[in-house]
Image (cartoon, rainbow, N blue to C red):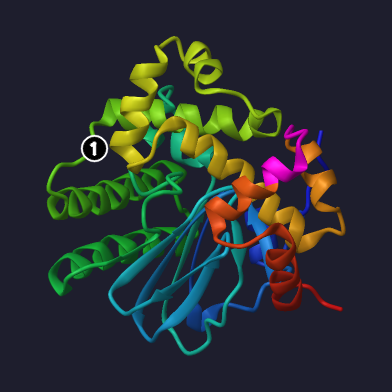
Amino acid sequence: MMKELFTHYNIGHFINQPSNQTEFEIMQFDNMEEPNVDDIHKHTFYEIIWTEKGVSKQTIDYKEYEVLPNSLFFISPNQVHQFEEWKPLKGGTILFTEDFFLLNHNNKDKLFELSFLDNFYANPCIQFDKENFRDIKQTIELISNEHKRHDKSETITQALLHILLAQIQRCIDTQTEKPISKNYLVVFKQFKNLLEQHFTANQTTSFFANHLNITSHHLNLITKNVTGKTSSEVIRARSILEAKRLLTFTDFTVSEIATQLNYFDSSYFAKLFKAETGKTPIVFKNQMSEKYRIR
């Protein structure tokens, strides 16, 4: 088992109450204390940042995103997120766990059917037109008002959260020429969860297809439909992402990293890395260590 490189924070850490096991929180930027968390970290929960005014930058796994007004930004569990400046912004953040979303619902697929959550191939930043953003903001205000009540109800808050997420999905679907089928999304996210458990073993598409009780051909079809990539490309990209994290945040050699990811020919692994990133592992390590590591 590979040692975790990043601190996993729960919602309590973001309200500066680390021992608080709360599963839902909503905060306006104006009233937020800066959380005492590492700049680079992982969440155990989902976060939706809404921005009414101002511009900020967010980084998720080496990709930088500009967050503009009238937009929402989504962070899912296990993504490596870099904390950015939020003081000049007008807006806020909604934090919720998977358990809170599924409270009194037995069907976990309900969460998987939302294309903008847990999908590392979807753009985590979505800008809306004024009319749609106004509707979304009205629901956010209802959630906020409910959460402030002394007799607040988890059931009502969860119902309003479901409405908000359904509104967001509707906006995305109307902007998409051919929305992805819910069944495909569910299977893809099951594949992604399995990959998260087994990526260090460098397994083949057929290994994951067998676990999902479908053929390799069908898994490929689904993955291509959701991401535009083959299953093998998605599997390889997950290994390369871990290699990037290890190169940036540890002192392991390229050969040690290749071995940890079950590539026993380090020169073959280095070629794969360069094909995927355009840089050799050593060049990448030097550039990223300078950017992210405190000397």
Q: x, y (%) of residue 146? A: 39, 58
Q: Which segment is the magenta one?
A: 262-269
Say which quadrant the N terminus sits in.
Answer: top right
State which quadrant residue 231 falls in.
top left
Q: Position of residue 180 (x, y in %)?
A: 23, 37
Q: Quarter of the image holding residue 186?
A: top left
Q: Is residue 291 left or right of residue 138?
A: right
- 186 in relation to 50, above or below: above
**Is residue 84 in the magenta section?**
no
Q: Residue at x 40, y 12 (%)?
A: 214
Dot 1 crowding, Cα within 10 Å, few <14, some 14–19, many 20+: some
Towards the viewer: 290 or 17? 290
* Side of 131 where 58 appears, left or right: right
**x%, y% of residue 66?**
41, 76
Question: Compared to 51, does 149 lie above or below?
Answer: above
Dot 1: element = loop
- Residue 39 in the image: above or below residue 78: below
Residue 265 visible in the snapshot: yes
Q: Closer to the camera, 174 or 206? A: 206
- Kind of residue at badge 1: Ile
Q: Residue at x 14, y 42 (%)?
A: 178
Q: Which residue is mark 1?
A: 180
Q: State how many labels appear.
A: 1
The percent position of residue 84, horizontal first and vertical second, equals 57, 77
* Res 6 visible: no
Q: Quadrant of the C terminus?
A: bottom right
Q: Residue at x 40, y 23 (%)?
A: 107
Judge whether 204 appears above or below 60 on screen. above
